[in-house]
Amino acid sequence: AICGGWVAVNLALRPFIASGELPESVLQRQVAAVSVGIVEGVALLDLPYHEDSTAEVDLNVVMTAVGDLIEVQGTAERAPFPRAQLDSLLDLAASGIQTLAAKQREALTPV
């Protein structure tokens, strides 16, 4: 919802920016979100429901396209997990966010 929402807001604001009613700076940062988790000991990106519901660790990450964090929400479902694993999951999320951000820009490119 966040990824598509950013594209929708961008498209909705374009006419107002083009007409000068709003400054270009109204869209300050590109934003995307992704889930990551650990399922059966393996770090996974973009968990579908069946993996999410059985994950040992479930993390939702919202970032800017340049890698700044906006929101991190996570849960250790069965047992605590080490900080190094969190760092690894954040790196995986950042990689996924970069892919999603590229897709967002692609969606905004005129055909």
Image (cartoon, helix red, strand yellow):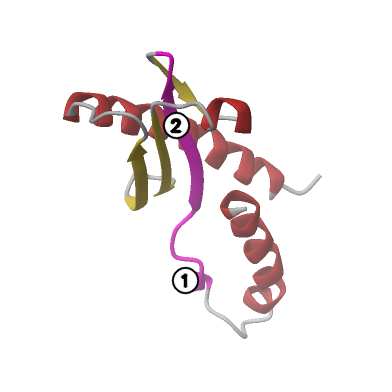
Q: Nearer the viewer, residue 9 or 109?
A: 9
Q: x and y percent of residue 35 in the render?
A: 48, 37
Q: Quadrant of residue 78?
A: top left
User: Mark 2 sits on what residue?
Assistant: 36
Q: Nearer the viewer, residue 94 or 79?
A: 79
Q: Nearer the viewer, residue 7 or 18?
A: 7
Q: Is residue 1 above or below residue 44?
A: below
Q: Is residue 52 above or below residue 67?
A: above
User: Mark 1 sits on what residue?
Assistant: 25
The residue located at (35%, 40%) in the rendering is 75
Secondary structure beneath label 2: strand
Q: Quadrant of residue 107?
A: top right
Please report whichever mark, 2 or 1, sits nearer to the chain's N-terminal start: 1
Q: x and y percent of residue 91 in the render?
A: 33, 29
Which stretch appears magenta?
24-40
Q: CA distance from mark 2 to mark 1?
A: 31 Å
Q: Is residue 51 above or below residue 64?
A: above
Any part of residue 4 in sight: yes
* Count of numbered labels shown in the rendering: 2
Residue 27 colored in magenta in the image:
yes
Q: Amino acid at mark 1?
A: Ser
Residue with the most extreme right position: 111
